[in-house]
Image (cartoon, rainbow, N blue to C red):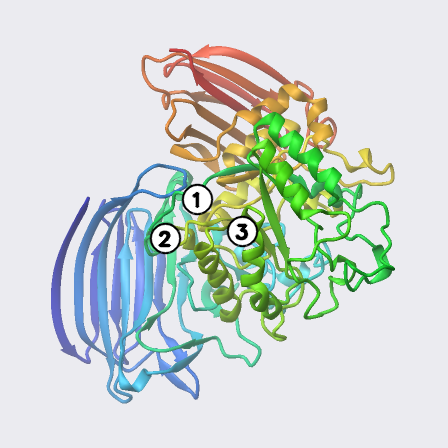
Amino acid sequence: MKNISLFIFFLFSTITFSQNLQSPDKQLELTVGVNKIGRPYYSLNYKTKPVLQTSFLGVILKNANTLAAEFEILKTSFSTVNESWKPVLGEQKEIQNQYNQLIVELFQKSTKRKMNIVFKLFNEGLAFRYEFPAQPEMNYFVITDEVTQFALTSNHKAFWIPGDYDSQEYVYNETKLSQVDVSKLDMNNGIGMKGPMANSRIQSPVMMKSTDGLYINIFEAAVVNYPIMHLDLDTTTFLMQSHLVPNAIGDKAYLQAPANSPWRTIMVSDDARKILASKMTLNLNEPSKIEDTSWIKPMKYVGIWWEMHVGKATWDYAGSQNAQMAQDAELKPTGKHGATTENTKRYIDFAAKHGFDGVLVEGWNIGWEDWFGNWKENVFDFVTAYPDFNVEEVQKYAESKGVKMIMHHETSGSVANYERRLDRAFSFMKKHNYNAVKSGYVGKIIPRGEWHDGQTMVNHFNWVVERAAEYKIMVNSHESSRPTGVHRTYPNYIAAEAARGNEFNAWSNGNPPMHETILPFTRFLGGPMDYTPGIFEIKMNHYDATKKEQVHTTLAKQLALYVTIYSPLQMAADLPENYERYPDAFQFIKDVEVDWDETKIMEAEPGDYLTIARKTKGKESWFLGAITDENARNTEITLDFLTPGKKYKATIYQDGKDAHWEKNPKAYSIKTVEVTAKTKLKLNLAAGGGTAISFIPLN
């Protein structure tokens, strides 16, 4: 369904101009203007409360040219859109796209340049972008900065991570805006690949809560042929300004008109649940460019991965021997290599027995002896296996068991090498019946001087997905720039990491209990995440008595994450033998779906708690996940999302009475009750805990 109305006004003026625009529900009001010196600006109110004060707009071009002042208004256009569309995979079967739009066409008389600013006002927030029409004066141009401001009204509470050009793998900080200070953070709690950072530069998305109860989120959507936007914060005035990630020589974006920037977004509500329910980011992206999407399928998988993180096995075959080729007669195994043919068969058997779709194998290909931190260009060729991994034998065995193999491509940051070899790598995958790839970008980027979040790398990540679509391959990127809804345009971009995932719990200070309650308000707004939940053996001293690391959740919370973390690609990340010790709890991971017809955000508060219920695509079954931070929590949930008149068997996986994420994380209990849409369930979540429930119809 689509309903569009259009109103056009022509203005030729150099005097002050302002125009108001309301959201469809009239709760948000935007004011757009051009002041006496021709500077474009905007402000935003929600239910008469100020969200953003006067904030200036514009871009700066190379050679001291600016598109931020001395503008005249040529024309303004209003339109209304109300339509719906169906995602290939997603949290709901149909998405509503409704907004009011204002286009302001600007002309800079001194340079004869034109620039449009397009504003879309949704019920849940504002989006705007710069558009550069075709014109002789801007056939080719270089952006060196944006003058995009977000003038916040007060000292909000914020959930933020530092503005690192190379990584998003940080624990979130919960502070007042005035307390943002990157210099006080521990920068060694990770893998050590850190880009340059300023003391008050943070990454978007940033989630905030005002003192008067407004939830505000600043982010971006549809980042294509453009660098990622970080935010420079004035900790005294609370003004945020866009900071684009540069390339090796300091330029930000190379463009050729007609062109446009990504959408800058401000979500706002007095109900945190509406931030999570918003599909604004997706709506701002282009529709799918893949005509036949029948090959794009959701997947649950297991794999040879966690055993390397806990030290049971290694990615490399020959340890420190610096192997050059798998054919080298001197190549000698260490005996701890995880990606062997026999071990892979064990995982395939486990997947087939328990109904999993796929098996991931990391460390199958040569190069892991000398891959990390050396800035070497040709470490991996993506087609040559180690001597103890027989690609053909594994392929035939997986096919005989009805299991798909998932390829792993670690680039070690050598993007130039990966692009040269990409077609051969994808052809190799198709030859051996792999339909999905997990790509990795650990390390400094080659070409040297580029950053993970710069325009060059954004183009690379998007291009790999586009090229993969031609081979009918699904992509799960790790260490990439964070997604911004581009999976609507290329739905084979099935998942990404681009945040601090579960793996950090194995070998660092880990992710605090509040971490998973913040991610839905930040990273997940851009797209599904391969977070790798499902760890049952919580404490790492199980593998080595000297280890103190652990997962900062209860076992029941690990189950709940399969519902609260949306991804059509979900891993049962723990070792098969650990699941076999807890078969009753493992049943939830086997049962839970990964593709949905409907999603209900039951409760939400960033940094504190989250409860979500989801309806299985094409079925009447529902699944619910409830999680909390370091504080125990009691709540009551009404099951009015269930179909009236139907009875359901509810299997409840909950924390044990004495459960605690640190003191007793594996204590859980399971009970089964009959429920209807009128039932109310009391949930008791331990500190760092959770509850997972399956609802299966009985009639």
Residue 77 sits in quarter: bottom left
Q: Quadrant of the C terminus?
A: top left
Amino acid type, mark 2: Ile
CB under 8 Å between discs 1 and 3: no
Type of the residue with mark 1:
Ile
x%, y% of residue 275? Answer: 40, 44
Point out the tag, 2 or 3, that comes first from the N-terminus. 2
State the residue position of label 1: 296
- On the rendered image, what quadrant is the N terminus found in? top left
Which of the two residues, 597 or 15, is positioned nearer the viewer here?
597
The tally of labels here is 3
Q: Is residue 404 left or right of residue 37?
A: right
Q: Nearer the viewer, mark 2 or mark 3?
A: 3
Query: What amino acid type is highlighted by mark number 3?
Result: Lys
Question: Percent from the top left, x then y, of residue 477?
Answer: 55, 53
- Which of the pair 410/133 is nearer the observer? 410
The residue under the point 69% across, 42% down is 304
Q: Nearer the viewer, residue 255 or 251?
A: 255
- Looking at the rendered structure, the secondary structure element under dot 3 is helix
Percent of width and height locating residue 319: 84, 55
Q: Nearer the viewer, residue 486 or 630?
A: 486
**Circle 3 residue:** 430
Specify whether residue 236 is in view.
no
**Which residue carries the number 2 mark?**
290
